[in-house]
Amino acid sequence: MTAANIREVLQGSPESAGVGSEAAFVVAADEIDISMDRMDSVSVRMVRRVAGKIVHLCDGKYTLGLANLRVRCGCPLSWKVRRLHAMERRGPRPHARVVFRLSDLPDAGVSEFSTSSWDFAEAMGELDDLGSMGGPRKGVLGIEAVRFPTRTGLEVSYCRPVLQVATLSSPVCATS
Ligand SMILES: [Zn+2]
């Protein structure tokens, strides 16, 4: 497996040498077909840092990192209120991660995509682990353009990452 194969599938180029056996890629493709076969393939964490230190780490409901203890973290269930609290610097922000293999190059190894997009976290919030997806899944990881008019009539646009997970009726076999 060479970087050239990966480059072809992603229509991208290596961004840097990476660390150890890792490499980062700048991707030009609007979407890529992926396979997710690990229990933690999709995770959404809420993180708040103060002076560089993590002071809140949760899955939106429970505090993480407390061994087997399940303690409610106090985050509001509403994503709207979560955004508001984060804007007021009194609530955590999302950190979503997708661990996957390229469907066209499963032998290229495991890749990771992470984002702090609120839209992405909100969409994935219900699928905070692969167990809740019902098992290994294929999906499409892509970039979607969003456009909306402001109150003053100005058109604002931005791009957000999206993950479409294949429906329960079309499961895939684990590739590992
Ligand atoms: Zn929390």
Image: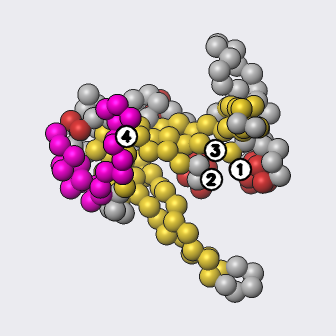
Q: Quadrant of residue 99?
A: top left
Q: Which residues are magenta?
A: 1-23
Instruction: Specify the quadrant of the image occupied by residue 26.
Output: bottom left
Q: Identify the residue position indicated by label 2 in the image.
A: 118
CA gap between label 3 and label 1 equals 10 Å
Instruction: Choose between 146 and 12: the one closer to the eye.
Output: 12
Amino acid marked by disc 3: Pro
> Which SS class for mark 4?
loop
Q: Are marks 2 and 3 in contact (CB under 8 Å)?
A: yes
Q: Earlier in the sequence, mark 2 or mark 1?
A: 1
Q: Are the two marked residues, 2 and 4, in contact with CB atoms closer than 8 angstroms?
A: no
Of labels 3 and 1, the one closer to you:
3
Marks 2 and 4, how far apart at CA:
27 Å
- How packed is label 4: few (under 14 Cα within 10 Å), some, or many (20 or more)? few
Q: Quadrant of the N terminus?
A: top left
Residue highlighted by disc 3: 94
Residue 42 percent across, percent down from the top left: 48, 38
Of the residues shown, which amino acid type is indicated by label 2?
Trp
Q: Which residue is mark 1?
A: 79
Task: Look at the numbered disc 3 and give the secondary structure of its residue.
Answer: strand
Q: Earlier in the sequence, mark 3 or mark 4?
A: 4
User: Which residue carries the number 4 mark?
Assistant: 18
Q: Comparing marks 2 and 4, which lies closer to the viewer?
A: 4
| 78 on left or right of 176 | right
Q: Nearer the viewer, residue 112 or 42?
A: 112
Q: Are marks 1 and 4 in contact (CB under 8 Å)?
A: no
Residue 95, how many percent across, how many down? 59, 42
In the structure shown, which secondary structural element does the residue marked by tag 1 occupy?
helix
Q: Are marks 2 and 1 in contact (CB under 8 Å)?
A: yes
